[in-house]
């Protein structure tokens, strides 16, 4: 599937070309995923994923990035400050391994 236009969460439309152009007009130093190790945005560790999500909040193209990722149904990774898995936003990454049988003591 090829997507050339996306409808933003505010209802406005933007082409993916415009999205790409806008991101390219921003200095790499201002895009946290370019200024930091990009592996963080696809990390296995839940704490690293939360760090990437927090870093996205200061990104000047955060809203466009999120809209684009929703439209593309990104299969995996942090985009626009949200964690995607199989095309949908999920609240947090689960740690590896089996869940505990009993709740951990608080
Ligand atoms: S919002 Fe998008 S472009 Fe900005 S740091 Fe996050 S993943 Fe990168």
Image (tube, rainbow, N blue to C red):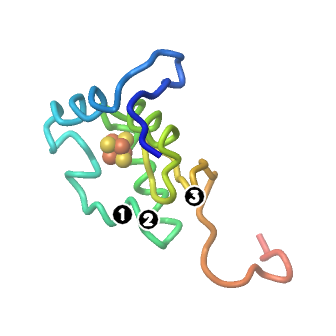
* Secondary structure type for disc 3: strand
Q: Which mark is residue 52?
A: none
Q: Secondary structure at mark 1?
A: helix
- In the rendered image, the quadrant that contains the C terminus is bottom right
> For this view, does 96 lie left or right of residue 99?
left
Q: CA distance from mark 1 to mark 3?
A: 15 Å
The furthest residue to the top: 12
State left or right for residue 4 relative to residue 75: left
User: Going 53% across and 67% down the picture, which residue do you hit?
Assistant: 46
Q: CA distance from mark 3 to mark 2?
A: 16 Å
Badge 2 crowding class, 10 Å Cα cut-off, few under 14, some 14 to 19, many 20 or more, is: some
Residue 17 drawn above or below residue 85: above
Q: Residue, x 49% and y 24% (percent of image)? A: 7
Q: Position of residue 81 (x, y in %)?
A: 46, 44
Q: Which mark is residue 40?
A: 1
- Quick check: marks 3 and 2 in contact, CB under 8 Å? no
Mark nearer the N terminus (1 vs 2):
1
Specify the quarter for ligand 1.
Answer: top left
The quadrant holding residue 29 is: top left
Q: Which mark is residue 85?
A: 3
Kindly identify the residue that appears in the image at 43 percent across and 68 percent down: 43
Disc 1 + disc 2, Cβ < 8 Å: yes
Q: Nearer the viewer, residue 71 or 81?
A: 71
> Residue 8: x and y, percent?
49, 24
Disc 2: residue Cβ within 8 A of ligand 1's nearest atom: no
Query: Which callout, 1 or 3, points to the residue nearer the camera?
Result: 3
> For residue 48, which numbered disc appears in the image?
2
In which quarter of the view is residue 80 placed?
Answer: top left
In the rendered view, does 98 fall on the left or right side of 101? left
């Amino acid at each position: 599937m090829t997507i050339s236009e996306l409808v933003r969460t505010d209802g406005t439309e933007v082409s993916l070309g415009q999205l790409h152009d806008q991101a390219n007009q921003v200095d790499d130093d201002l895009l946290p995923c370019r200024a930091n190790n990009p592996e963080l945005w696809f990390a296995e560790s839940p704490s690293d994923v939360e760090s990437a999500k927090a870093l996205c909040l200061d990104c000047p193209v955060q809203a466009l990035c999120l809209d684009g990722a929703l439209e593309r149904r990104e299969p995996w990774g942090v985009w626009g400050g949200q964690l995607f898995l199989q095309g949908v936003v999920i609240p947090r990454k689960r740690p590896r391994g089996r869940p505990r049988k009993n709740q951990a003591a608080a």
